[in-house]
Amino acid sequence: MELGRTGTAAVTDGSPFGTDNLPYGVFSTPSTRPRVGVRLGDTVVDLGAALGSDGPDAAFAAPVLNPFMAQGRTRWAEVRERITALVAAGVPDAAVHAVGDVVLHLPFEVADYVDFYACEHHATNLGRLFRPDTEPLTPNWKHMPLGYHGRAGTVVVSGTDIVRPSGQRKDTADAAPAFGPSTRLDIEAELGFVVGVGTPLGAPIPVDAFAEHVFGAVLVNDWSARDLQAWEYVPLGPHLGKSFATSVSPWVVPLLALEAARIPLPGQDDPRPLPYLRASAPWGLDVDLAVEWNGEVVSRPPYREMYWSPAQMLAHMTVNGASTRTGDLFASGTVSGPATNQRGSLIELSSGGREPITVTGEPRTFLLDGDTVSLTGTAPGAAGGRIGFGEVRGRIRPARLTSAGRRPRLTDRRRSVTS
């Protein structure tokens, strides 16, 4: 059964990019400037060419989604209805481009970036690795969504190569720290949320006002240098171990497309959250992620297992009066499930590097130069099938010159690096 027809191609039933999805992105062709489009099947619909470019529609000619996102929820719903009607009637040929013929860009200008730590399974796993002699969850973990403020300028679009970061590291047996390329380079499979309508300083966002401010969701890979992180994170938290790169998918799935994916949150009764974190109808999202390492699926993290909801993250992020801006990105933190093959980071999958996993026939722990990691995700759609988030992919490049002016020695790809 066809869901809709463009001027050049049909969108068949079962496509993760049917009319119940319609994710937004920014694309260009060899002879044109970046502009806003919508993914429909294996095509991109140029919204300026399809809907017009006058008045509020001038936002579709922008090289980022920010002007459109800033127009607000009523406008988002109106445009979605117009696109759906256009697809049913037939999109003009001139507005349709094959996905393989376009270049996809970072879909929005990132204003600020906050990364949370909202998955109980992940926090418990890391707590056991980092603090084996204490309780895995810190005393504050179930009282508020913990997070850190990241670096907006190093958020990159899928397909961007990731240069191995360098910095200080110190093992417990070392007398002093050393400088060099990270040898425990990791990934974090996450879901991110993009603010469309910002708020002024001193105006917290209530937990039930989430949909008035958040435009949509993207896949996120928060690359992590675990050796740099372990040495620096006490007492102020992640810095160089996280700030070198965060990758996002090129498609922003609108919040309006995720209504069918809403599910109840896991129980938050012991302890009960403080009033500002209590929603009138608490909800999470039923999103299935997959982590591919050099072409092999090594994990399938379930977002449905998250303890803190996106609405609670936003409410907590602004409860102190912090302002928000169009283009703010906040991510969930690593998504992990209760099963071993549902862990969303390599440090968890390999038990801190002590238990290598087999990838394409080799025992592996952390990332080596030349490795490629790809994250994908799907969720229930309104039409009864699955809608897709696309892909966020990155390949590891060797570290650049060290402080001594020398290139680091290339890693032996035949063995794992665990220290």
Image (cartoon, rainbow, N blue to C red):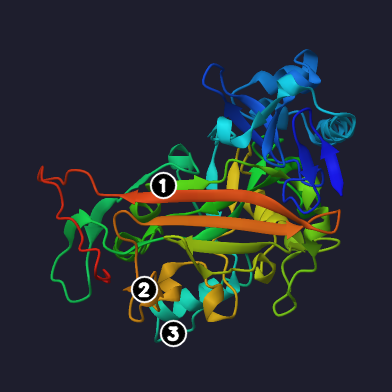
Q: Residue at x 66, y 28 (%)?
A: 97
In the rendered view, tell whether residue 164 sits above or below residue 142.
Answer: above
SS for dot 1: loop
Q: Residue at x 72, y 69 (%)?
A: 273
Tell me the tag on residue 245. 1
Q: Residues within 10 Å of mark 1 (few under 14, many from 20)?
A: many
User: What residue is disc 2 on?
Assistant: 361
Left or right for 375, reference 8: left
Residue 235 picture quarter: bottom left
Q: Going from the N terminus, do you reach mark 1 or mark 3 first?
A: 3
Q: Using the rendered image of the protein, determine whether residue 402 is visible from the camera's viewpoint.
A: yes
Q: Amino acid at mark 2?
A: Gly
User: What residue is disc 3 on?
Assistant: 134
Q: Using the rendered image of the protein, determine whether residue 319 is visible from the camera's viewpoint.
A: no
Q: Residue at x 57, y 23 (%)?
A: 34
Q: Going from the N terminus, do you reach mark 2 or mark 3 first?
A: 3
Q: Nearer the viewer, mark 2 or mark 3?
A: 2
Most foreground residue, 182 or 325? 182
- Tell me where residue 170 appears, x and y as whole percent: 22, 66
In the rendered view, tell whether residue 355 sits above or below residue 377.
Answer: below
Q: Going from the N terminus, do you reach mark 1 or mark 2 first?
A: 1
Discs 2, 3 touching: Cβ within 8 Å: no
Residue 102 picture quarter: top right
Q: Residue at x 26, y 68 (%)?
A: 417
Could you give the CA–CA distance between mark 1 and mark 3, rounded to whole angstroms?
31 Å
Could you give the CA–CA distance between mark 2 and mark 3, rounded to whole angstroms?
36 Å
Q: Amino acid at mark 3?
A: Thr
Q: Nearer the viewer, mark 1 or mark 2?
A: 2
